[in-house]
Image (spheres, coloured by chain):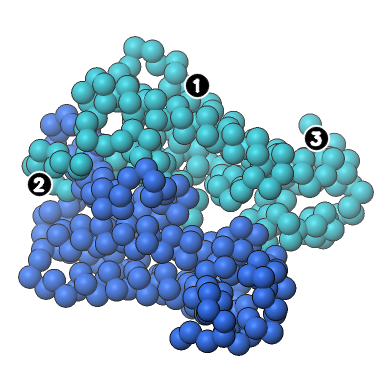
Chain colours: A cyan, B blue
Amino acid sequence: MRRGRPGHDQDAVLAAAVRLFNERGYDATSMDDLARSLGITKSSIYHHVRGKQELLRMAVDHALDGLDDALAQVRGRAGASALDRLEMLIRLSVLVLAARLPYVTLLLRVRGNSEVETQALARRRDFDHEVTTLVKAAQQDGAIRPDVDPATAARLLFGMVNSLAEWYDPARGSAEQLAATVSALAFDGLSVRPSAPASVG
Amino acid sequence: MRRGRPGHDQDAVLAAAVRLFNERGYDATSMDDLARSLGITKSSIYHHVRGKQELLRMAVDHALDGLDDALAQVRGRAGASALDRLEMLIRLSVLVLAARLPYVTLLLRVRGNSEVETQALARRRDFDHEVTTLVKAAQQDGAIRPDVDPATAARLLFGMVNSLAEWYDPARGSAEQLAATVSALAFDGLSVRPSAPASVG
């Protein structure tokens, strides 16, 4: 969808918008700010996008599409156990966050203040629901400790994954390595002591 | 520090301010909004606090003081192993988050846009540094798997803990129960399969 001058195509406009939204907040960012940051006129931005809401929608969709692709890959692995599918989803989600970091950062700050935000929150809820369903299935298989609430486990797992948006730095190690660390912590725990799962109730 | 009319003392003003800051954002909240939400005049608010910055400072300090108290309790347990102290710190932090939820929520949104915010971020960094030091010590004791980077493990642990600010609902279970679940997931993992720690490198 390249239109207008090279280097100012839709992707570049979107990337600049996401950077400003994350730095200053969506409400505090104007289309004038965006034009200034790109060094182009406001009217040339409107060659690429309809407006600020449209930029927000494209940005959060880019994050959510990545997570939904991960879910689709996991669903495609019908032969795998629920535990293996959950583990795969955690790893793939870490890779999506690392690859689409500013987009996910923006998504995680959405609070439902517009239709675009409400729709994004609904898609996040659907995703969370699927994670909970996987935890439940793995628990029914006897592969996940029976003493944790599946919804709580799902939230804690993605609390860990989503925290990447706050601190991930590609210079400190590959995303694949980080995905392996998250998976190890989530499923085997940090401790090396041989222990039966302690009662949580 | 009760001054002025009952029910409008400093704590009530602070609680209302934190609610508005979390709902609308700090920048978008005016002292007029705060007066309106309390049903009092702006000048009566100034009997209790010097201004908006002061409210923000009090709010983030309330969150940080809770976390520092947890750290002080853990430091006081000199006889305990590093692993036990780390586990205790995770549990106590969950309890602090549950008890001071709106204050911690506000703290976690601070981005360093003023001196108050910069100081809060510095206190957060000191706290994170102490967590990393505990992880390292537990690793040197052979109690934590050697194949994870201590700083990464500390961030993931507190990614999980801090996520409570997004979803914790006291109606769904006690804070003590949740603290036990977080600790179980962090140290023993979700999986029940007996497994040697997989290599992460």
Which comes before the other along the chain, label 2 or label 3? 3
Q: Is residue B193 left or right of residue B71?
A: left
Confirm whether residue B17 shows in the render: yes
Q: Are marks 1 and 2 in contact (CB under 8 Å)?
A: no
Disc 3 secondary structure class? loop
Q: What's the amino acid at mark 1?
A: Ala
Please tell me how crowded label 3 is: few (under 14), some (14-19), or many (20+) other residues with Cα within 10 Å: few
Q: What's the amino acid at mark 3?
A: Arg
For the residue pair B38 and B46, the one nearer the viewer reads as B38
Up the image or down, A164 lies above or below B10; here it is above
Residue under the point 68% across and 62% down: A24
For the residue pair A167 and B86, the one nearer the viewer reads as B86
**Chain at tag 1:** A
Which comes before the other along the chain, label 1 or label 3? 3
Q: Which residue is mark 3?
A: A2
The residue positioned farthest toward the front in the image shown: B6
For the residue pair A3 and B164, the one nearer the viewer reads as B164
Q: Which residue is mark 1?
A: A72
In terms of image quadrants, where is residue B70? bottom left
For marks 1 and 2, give the CA distance. Answer: 36 Å
Q: Which residue is mark 2?
A: A193
Q: What's the amino acid at mark 2?
A: Arg
Residue under the point 90% across and 54% down: A41
**Chain at tag 2:** A
Residue under the point 58% across and 69% down: B17
Up the image or down, A106 lies above or below A132; here it is below
Locate residue B58, reporting x and y percent: 49, 78
